[in-house]
Image: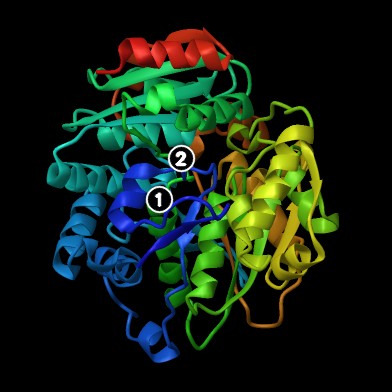
Amino acid sequence: MQYVSTRGRAPALNFSAVTLTGLAADGGLYLPERWPTFAPDQIAAMRGLPYAALAQKVMQPFVGTCLSADRLGELCEQAYARFAHKAVTPLVQLDQRDWLLELFHGPTLAFKDVALQLLGLLFEEFLAREGGRLTIVGATSGDTGSAAIDAVAGRENVEIFMLHPKGRVSDVQRVQMTTVRAPNVHNIAIEGSFDDAQAIVKRIFAEESVTARHRIGAVNSINWARLMAQVVYYFAAALQLGAPDRRAAFSVPTGNFGDVFAGHVAARMGLPIEKLVVATNVNDILHRALSNGDYSAGDVTPTASPSMDIQVSSNFERLLFDVGGRDGAALAEQMRGFDASRAMQLTDGQRTGAGERIVSVRADADQMSLAMRRAWEESGELIDPHTAIGLHAARCVDLPPGVPMVTLATAHPAKFRDPVEQATGLRPGLPTRVGDLFAREERYDVLPGTYEAVRDYIMDHAA
């Protein structure tokens, strides 16, 4: 399996190289040159597999010869052994139609663990073969940072610099990052938004003075291996609900578009998905783009769902490439225009291709709170604000009779204690497995939200 850039000019890479590379040299994002597919009987044969075994089956076509089936299976077993629930990503029924897919049973209580626990092992595996080092530079709106840090803390030949927007993540999200004392972990709070942090990270990948001295790697969802691992739980949920003989729909709380794009990949592979619902908060660039083709960025509005407080969604580029004819040169020109003006119109082909399976719904603060309250009062489930936006969106979409709707529960409610308590009157407690987070000493540096400040910090501190 070879991987190509969405902008058409970077060299094709195999799976191990694309895992260690992250962003393509031409500024694009890597995708498989073709989508592997499973026939219905092959999907049916996956029923009843333990999660790690299912992960190996789903991911093996993407890995190719870079890992044997046995070795990939061993890494999956190791990655998911730390999850608190034996099912790894269990389904919970809310009512006759609606289900929650709980993705927060990993070590940092968020869906990012499902991919990043594996990604940390892949880094270590591939670096050991090459004898090199990797300097990871990432940006987080909350959950990616803690999950990535947990996955690589203390690992050999890996160092991580994680940027978060100061004051715009929850207290639990911040402390999960900043109390990790491993010497290969560097936390940076920038004065600015997540979009500012993400733009800085992309420039780091493109600057030769940095890349000539350090091999820069990615843990954000610009890294293909992370998205690949997220495809698995769509298969896990759909199989439990009757796939391939029964279709299912998924509502996905969406910020950087990686999680919902993983659902798009699952459908491309043959999983029978009726609808993918892109659920956004008031930072609704994706809703506007999918509804009327208007992909124009405005100012970020801070909300109680900070992981969705994003205006520029990196992975949306992958969708536009895939549904718009896979024309890298045309997309590169389109993205250059967006970078210059912060606005663009989707082409007719992009809108038509996206609309075949994807719809979008926007939720405001009141609708989010109502969804949290209803989930508790009607089903006895405490959910976090991001999941609540997904559940609100799920209930706004009509489906054919008999098609279940699965909302991705992306974070444990205790990561967002204040808004959950305001909506339900209950303050969720942290699971005992995360320990005494707030008794630990924090360590992070505050920098201006400028590229030069962050670049110089990394050059001064990287091994």
Q: What number of labels is visible?
A: 2
CB atoms at circles 1 and 2 under 8 Å apart? Answer: yes
Quadrant of the image occupied by residue 116? top left
The amino acid type found where label 2 is placed reads Asn
- Please name whichever residue, 70 or 402, is drawn nearer the observer in this view of the structure: 70
Mark 2: few/some/many CA within 10 Å (<14, 14-19, 20+): many
Quadrant of the image occupied by residue 391? bottom right
In the rendering, which numbered label is found on residue 48?
Answer: none
Residue marked by disc 1: 226
Q: Position of residue 371 (x, y in %)?
A: 69, 48
Q: Residue at (28%, 37%) from the top-left corner? A: 151
Q: Residue at (54%, 47%) from the top-left corner? A: 28
- Please name whichever residue, 101 or 29, is drawn nearer the observer in this view of the structure: 29
Q: CA distance from mark 1 to mark 2?
A: 8 Å
Q: Is residue 219 left or right of residue 337?
A: left
Question: Quadrant where the C terminus lies?
Answer: top left
Q: Position of residue 322 (x, y in %)?
A: 60, 64
Residue 172 visible:
no
Q: Position of residue 326 (x, y in %)?
A: 61, 65
Q: Residue at (51%, 66%) from the top-left corner? A: 265
Question: Quadrant where the N terminus lies?
Answer: bottom left
Q: SS at mark 2? A: loop
Q: Is residue 276 left or right of residue 187?
A: right
Residue marked by disc 2: 220
Q: SS at mark 1? A: helix
Q: Position of residue 295 (x, y in %)?
A: 78, 46
* Dot placed on the residue nearer the N-terminal end, 1 or 2: 2
- Please name whichever residue, 13 or 75, is drawn nearer the observer in this view of the structure: 13
Q: Is residue 299 above or below residue 439?
A: below
Q: Is residue 254 above or below residue 445?
A: below
